Image: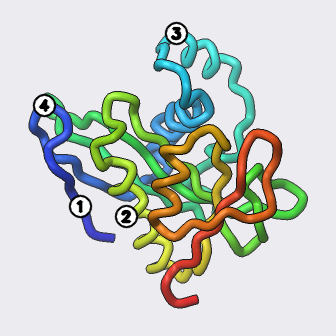
């Protein structure tokens, strides 16, 4: 996967995308919490309380140590380090143990989350481009996801990438599937 950038997003620093590793587990844990609480303003204390419960989460547990895991992180340089602006990743699930966006065992489920301050600035699009490129390079032919029915902004973005709504889903959300080039 190649690195990418968008227009300066945070204090005039360009956004770079890098491949996620097992060392990014904390970033992915924050990201999945942000994805679940997408309607709410971020509250660090609420996240810390949630994280202290150490509840299992098959979207992130042992990420990078399970065959097929792949993801990308968008970040801007920040005082010698990086300021994470978002993350996107996918995992494979089985019929016996799967999440809401499950379609089939050979179709990984995607999760994406963009920091509240970076939304509407192209970070989500950059993450999706990088993750779909990574998936294609690894021979993945389809990706699935589950999105809240009320999250019209996200649903529009997914549709613009070619995700199509399926008959699957539940009262909270819809399952969408994207066919990648080569299928």
Q: Secondary structure at mark 1?
A: loop
Residues tagged 2 and 3 counted as in contact (Cβ below 8 A): no
Q: Dot 2, crowdedness within 10 Å: few (<14), some or many (≥20)?
A: many
Q: Dot 1, crowdedness within 10 Å: few (<14), some or many (≥20)?
A: some
- Residue behind mark 4: 11
Query: Of marks 4 and 3, which one's residue comes earlier in the chain?
Result: 4
Residues tagged 4 and 1 counted as in contact (Cβ below 8 A): no
- Residue behind mark 2: 130
CA gap, disc 4 and disc 1? 18 Å
- Residue behind mark 1: 4
CA gap, disc 4 and disc 3? 25 Å
Q: Is residue 86 above or below residue 116?
A: below
CA gap, disc 1 and disc 2? 8 Å
Q: Is residue 130 above or below residue 32?
A: below
- Residue behind mark 3: 45
Question: Looking at the image, which is closer to me, 140 or 55?
Answer: 140
Query: Of marks 1 and 3, which one's residue comes earlier in the chain?
Result: 1
Identify the image quadrant of the C terminus.
bottom right
Q: Secondary structure at mark 4?
A: loop
Residues tagged 4 and 2 counted as in contact (Cβ below 8 A): no
Query: Of marks 1 and 2, which one's residue comes earlier in the chain?
Result: 1
CA gap, disc 4 and disc 2? 23 Å
Question: Looking at the image, which is closer to me, 176 or 12?
Answer: 176
Q: Secondary structure at mark 3?
A: helix
Q: Position of residue 180 (x, y in %)?
A: 52, 79
Query: Of marks 4 and 1, which one's residue comes earlier in the chain?
Result: 1
Residues tagged 1 and 2 counted as in contact (Cβ below 8 A): yes
Residue, far top: 45
CA gap, disc 2 and disc 3? 31 Å
Q: Position of residue 167 (x, y in %)?
A: 80, 63
Q: Position of residue 33 (x, y in %)?
A: 58, 30
Q: Residue at x 52, y 55 (%)?
A: 89
């Amino acid at each position: 996967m190649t690195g990418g950038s968008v227009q300066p997003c945070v204090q005039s620093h360009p956004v770079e995308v890098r491949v996620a590793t097992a060392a990014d587990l904390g970033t992915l844990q924050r990201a999945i919490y942000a994805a679940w609480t997408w309607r709410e303003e971020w509250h660090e204390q609420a996240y810390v309380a949630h994280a202290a419960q150490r509840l299992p989460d098959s979207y992130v547990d042992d990420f990078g140590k399970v065959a097929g895991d792949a993801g990308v992180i968008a970040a801007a340089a920040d005082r010698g380090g990086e300021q994470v602006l978002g993350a996107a990743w996918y995992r494979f699930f089985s019929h016996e143990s799967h999440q809401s966006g499950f379609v089939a065992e050979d179709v990984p489920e995607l999760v994406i989350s963009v920091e509240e301050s970076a939304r509407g600035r192209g970070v989500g699009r950059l993450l999706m481009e990088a993750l779909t490129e990574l998936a294609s390079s690894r021979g993945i032919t389809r990706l699935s996801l589950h999105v809240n029915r009320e999250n019209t902004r996200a649903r529009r973005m997914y549709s613009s990438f070619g995700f199509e709504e399926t008959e699957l889903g539940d009262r909270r959300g819809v399952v969408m599937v994207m066919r990648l080039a080569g299928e």
